[in-house]
């Protein structure tokens, strides 16, 4: 299917040798911003093609991370296939990879090799630990990166076990950091003509992204433990239960507490011992805030509470939305944070934009659907490498090129 | 916070010594940052780490983060390490935004900046005469970046939506993007994520937008307004979930949080070992086969109950119990050695912040960087995340005190004389807290009242 590029990165071509989440997310982000992304897949394809749920053979996982890209599928076990990939790098500005340590080198697609073919290429690598340091040769993924960087340790309630984050936000962070670093390097390339190697570790990014958690350790040796998600410096700040769901409330000051205690019908708590001061309320979440809010909310509907708090009293409050609700939400639709795309097999599906920013001059937009395996083999090889129809045919016959335009749902 | 006592700092030393020459791909680009708390300051730090010159402008009461823990007390007073960690490597101005002269100075600086960032509530910058519609007139090439909860509402805004007027903190963005819903146990209320991910993740997304806009600017000379919302960014970080619910029939319930294990992959999550917990993440069949070998059960890899992720999900209780039974007989160390080191299965210990700051991996990656901070001396803050081979970034230096570089910046870029700067201090347009022992803001109302009383006394 033909793609429609718009945005500030139109004209930049990216070769993506990635699977899973972090690298593909980076590629999708750059595609939203207008870059042309060619995804190189192995014979079996990106493994997320096989992760459920599917619709008519197309995976929600794969679509989410790969819409707006072109797919070239090759049997990378064959030298000819790798040679084609190396040929393609001559025509690209950026190379992305997130394979397990050692794998990209084994394919002969490491930076040292590619740099000789295209010295001005920007070669970006994203991995769990980064490509240097004592753990550089170990495998890992989002859940390991979150555990290594203190997040799993601090997620959950004080009296329970450490919990994994419900959504692999770490890979989104790693992919975003890689996009940032690559574009920084691209600015340098525009000014000097030089390419370079960019190495991003998802664990590093997860450390950097965690507010004041690192300095708590380095400055005060303060362990950041589990708080049940409540802010211990102010309150009520966190998630509370309603009769039919949950809602979040963020109280950062005593003035706000005046509004909240009024809304709860408990104005006397504004001045009461243990309640009156922000820091105290933060500390007293488990003894004061949670029992009070739970008791108050137990017979009230979630949306009713949000209406009282947010709409009538301007208190920072919101419903803990399910993904069904998020997917239909009018605000996200209007901002095109969520939009519908037409997949060749699955038909109409919704996706969230990897690039969530809005711009006035060069508007980012989804370029099109996620590709089927090897869907763009002919186009790319003919356009960039001037292969003839016959040559391409022979590559199929030799099993170098692979294509699957009619995916079947795994049982 | 202790009582404030004044002391005298050598202002010249402060101005000269604190920030070292920048390096990195953004060297030579200037950023004007009207930023506070977390999202925009984190963004400013990313820009500074890559070489940009970041000039942060604060109101007299200062960035709220200056009042947040942890604090460190040194020979000359204390400082919030919170503030330092989000603002290292920046120059600092502090001025009374209500004064027309202050607005004029900010406009003059905007004229010579490439990028402007702000995270005030939508509408506040416009009311001050500092909105995009004001800045674009004097500097059409500027990349003006606004960070907010639900997006900007201005009539020039790229994508206003129905919620753009709402107040939003991190906790609201987590709630309204589905992140809370997926975090915790299915039979209990969900809970917030461990840290304010939406702020820093939004700062990171803004960095990508800015650099993309900068590429456009280098090509065409044109600037633009970049509008980044916490809620949008968190929605985009939803893995496959939005697509997943759109594929499902109406009557299928929305996916729900799943305690210690991730919902749509197995075995994937936190497992109990003999002495503590660890994580194991098997996201494809190759890795599953290696896990089975590591457990001494290679036959499980081709067992029709477990051979694909779909089958493992159908029998997740069984396979997860097999894995946990194997783990619980071994220590975390032993499990990780076998799984990660011998069999290349993604697995690892669950480290606390005090653990990871000592870990040789993060030491080797220079994720803890010593900086020399006024008042409190050396401390370690987080390092430059992305490692660039040819034009590496670096931490440019300490965080600014409130108004620390007032004189330096006004003299250097706007040609003010010392006497003119003194006059601006006297008129309470410029303020600083350099002579305060603790990093608090300045109560401008009090100072104004005092000045008025003095004048009428005369």
Image (spheres, coloured by chain):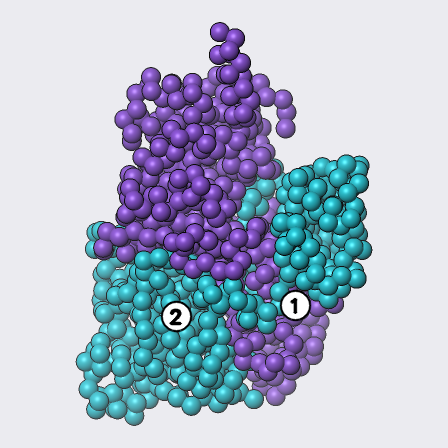
Q: Residue at x 41, y 85 (%)?
A: A344
What is the CA distance from the residue labelled 1 to the residue labelled 2?
Answer: 29 Å
Closer to the eye: label 1 or 2: 2
The residue beneath circle 1 is: B257
Q: The cyan chain is which one?
A: A
Q: The purple chain is which one?
A: B
Is residue B25 positioned above or below A142 on the image? above
Q: What element carries label 2?
A: loop
Say which quarter of the image contains residue A364.
bottom left
The x, y position of residue B445, in whole percent, is: 54, 25
Discs 1 and 2 carry the same chain letter: no
Q: Is residue A47 left or right of residue A363?
A: right
Q: Dot 2 falls on which chain?
A: A
Q: Residue at x 42, y 62 (%)?
A: A355
Q: Is residue B177 visible?
A: yes
The x, y position of residue A176, in whole percent, is: 43, 59
Q: Which residue is drawn at 50% across and 46% down?
A: B121
Dot label at residue A366 = 2
Q: How crowded is mark 2: few (under 14 residues within 10 Å), some or many (20 or more)?
A: many
Mark count? 2
Q: How crowded is mark 1: few (under 14 residues within 10 Å), some or many (20 or more)?
A: many
Q: Foreground: A63 or B276?
A: A63
Is residue A281 positioned above or below A17 on the image? above
Q: Is mark 1 on a helix, strand or loop?
A: loop
């Amino acid at each position: 299917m033909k793609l429609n590029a718009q945005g500030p990165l139109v004209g930049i071509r990216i070769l993506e040798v990635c699977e899973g989440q972090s690298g593909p997310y980076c590629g999708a982000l750059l595609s939203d911003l207008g870059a042309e992304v060619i995804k190189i897949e192995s014979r079996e394809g990106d493994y997320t093609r096989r992760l459920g749920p599917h619709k008519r053979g197309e995976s929600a996982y794969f679509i989410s991370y790969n819409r707006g890209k072109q797919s070239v599928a090759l049997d990378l076990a064959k030298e000819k296939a790798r040679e084609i990939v190396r040929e393609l790098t001559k025509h690209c500005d950026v190379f992305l990879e997130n394979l397990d340590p050692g794998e990209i080198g084994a394919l002969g697609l490491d930076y040292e090799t590619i740099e000789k073919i295209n010295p001005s290429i920007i070669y970006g690598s994203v991995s769990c630990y980064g490509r240097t340091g004592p753990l550089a040769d170990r495998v890992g993924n989002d859940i390991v990166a979150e555990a290594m960087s203190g997040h799993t340790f601090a997620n959950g309630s004080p009296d329970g076990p450490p919990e994994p984050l419900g959504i692999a936000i770490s890979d989104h962070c790693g992919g975003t950091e890689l996009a940032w670093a690559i574009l920084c390097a691209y600015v340098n390339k525009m000014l000097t003509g030089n390419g370079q190697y960019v190495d991003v570790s998802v664990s590093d990014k997860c450390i950097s992204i965690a507010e004041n958690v690192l300095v708590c350790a380095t400055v005060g040796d303060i362990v950041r433990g589990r708080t049940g998600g409540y802010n211990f410096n102010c309150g009520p700040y966190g998630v509370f239960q309603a009769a039919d769901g949950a809602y979040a409330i963020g109280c950062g000051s005593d003035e706000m507490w005046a509004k909240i205690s009024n809304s709860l019908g408990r104005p006397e708590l504004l001045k009461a011992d243990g309640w009156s001061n922000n820091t105290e309320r933060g500390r007293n979440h488990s003894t004061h805030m949670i029992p009070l809010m739970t008791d108050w909310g137990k017979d009230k509907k979630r949306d009713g509470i949000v209406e009282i708090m947010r709409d009538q009293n301007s208190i920072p409050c919101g419903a803990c939305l399910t993904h069904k609700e998020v997917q239909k939400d009018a605000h996200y639709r209007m901002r095109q944070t969520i939009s519908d795309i037409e997949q060749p097999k699955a038909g109409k599906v919704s996706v969230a934009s990897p690039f969530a920013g809005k711009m006035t001059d060069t508007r980012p937009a989804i370029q099109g659907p996620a590709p089927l395996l090897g869907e763009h083999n002919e186009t790319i090889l003919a356009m960039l490498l001037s292969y003839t129809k016959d040559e391409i045919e022979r590559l199929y016959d030799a099993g170098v090129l692979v294509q699957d335009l009619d995916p079947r749902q795994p049982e | 916070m202790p009582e404030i006592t004044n002391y005298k700092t050598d202002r010249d030393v402060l101005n000269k010594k604190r920030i070292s020459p920048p390096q990195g791909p953004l060297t030579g680009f200037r950023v004007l940052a009207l930023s506070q708390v977390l999202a925009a300051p984190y963004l400013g730090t990313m820009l500074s780490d890559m070489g940009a010159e970041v000039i942060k402008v604060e109101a007299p009461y200062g960035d709220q983060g200056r009042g947040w823990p942890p604090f460190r007390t040194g020979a000359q007073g204390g400082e919030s390490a919170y503030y330092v960690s989000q603002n290292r490597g920046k120059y600092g101005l502090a001025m009374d935004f209500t004064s027309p002269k202050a607005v004029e100075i900010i406009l003059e600086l905007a004229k010579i900046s490439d990028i402007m960032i702000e995270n005030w509530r939508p509408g506040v910058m416009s009311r001050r005469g500092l909105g995009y519609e004001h800045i674009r007139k004097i500097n059409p090439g500027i990349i003006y970046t606004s960070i907010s909860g639900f997006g900007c509402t201005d009539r020039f805004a790229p994508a206003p939506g129905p919620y753009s007027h709402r107040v939003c903190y991190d906790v609201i963005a987590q709630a309204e993007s589905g992140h809370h819903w997926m975090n915790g146990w299915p039979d209990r209320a969900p809970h917030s994520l461990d840290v304010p991910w939406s702020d820093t993740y939004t700062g990171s997304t803004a960095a990508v937008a800015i650099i993309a806009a900068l590429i456009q600017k280098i090509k065409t000379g044109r600037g633009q307004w970049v509008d980044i919302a916490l809620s949008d960014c968190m929605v985009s970080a939803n893995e496959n979930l939005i697509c997943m619910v759109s594929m499902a029939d109406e009557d299928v319930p929305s996916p729900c949080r799943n305690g210690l294990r991730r919902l749509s992959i197995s075995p994937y999550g936190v497992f109990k070992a003999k002495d503590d917990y660890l994580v194991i993440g098997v996201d494809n069949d190759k890795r599953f086969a290696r896990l089975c070998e590591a457990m001494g059960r290679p036959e499980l890899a081709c067992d029709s109950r477990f051979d694909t992720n779909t089958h493992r999900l159908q029998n997740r209780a069984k396979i997860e119990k097999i894995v946990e039974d194997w783990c619980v007989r071994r220590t975390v160390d032993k499990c990780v050695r076998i799984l990660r080191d011998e069999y290349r299965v993604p697995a690892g210990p669950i480290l606390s912040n005090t653990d990871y700051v000592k870990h040789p991996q993060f030491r080797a990656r220079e994720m803890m960087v010593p900086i020399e901070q006024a008042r409190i001396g050396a401390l370690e803050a987080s390092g430059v995340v992305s490692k660039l081979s040819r034009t590496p970034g670096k931490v440019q230096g300490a965080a600014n005190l409130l108004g620390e570089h007032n004189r330096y910046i006004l003299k250097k870029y706007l040609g003010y004389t010392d006497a003119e700067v003194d006059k601006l201090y006297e008129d309470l347009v410029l303020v600083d807290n350099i002579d305060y022992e603790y990093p608090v803001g300045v109560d401008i109302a009090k100072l104004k009242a005092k000045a008025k009383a003095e004048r009428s006394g005369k």
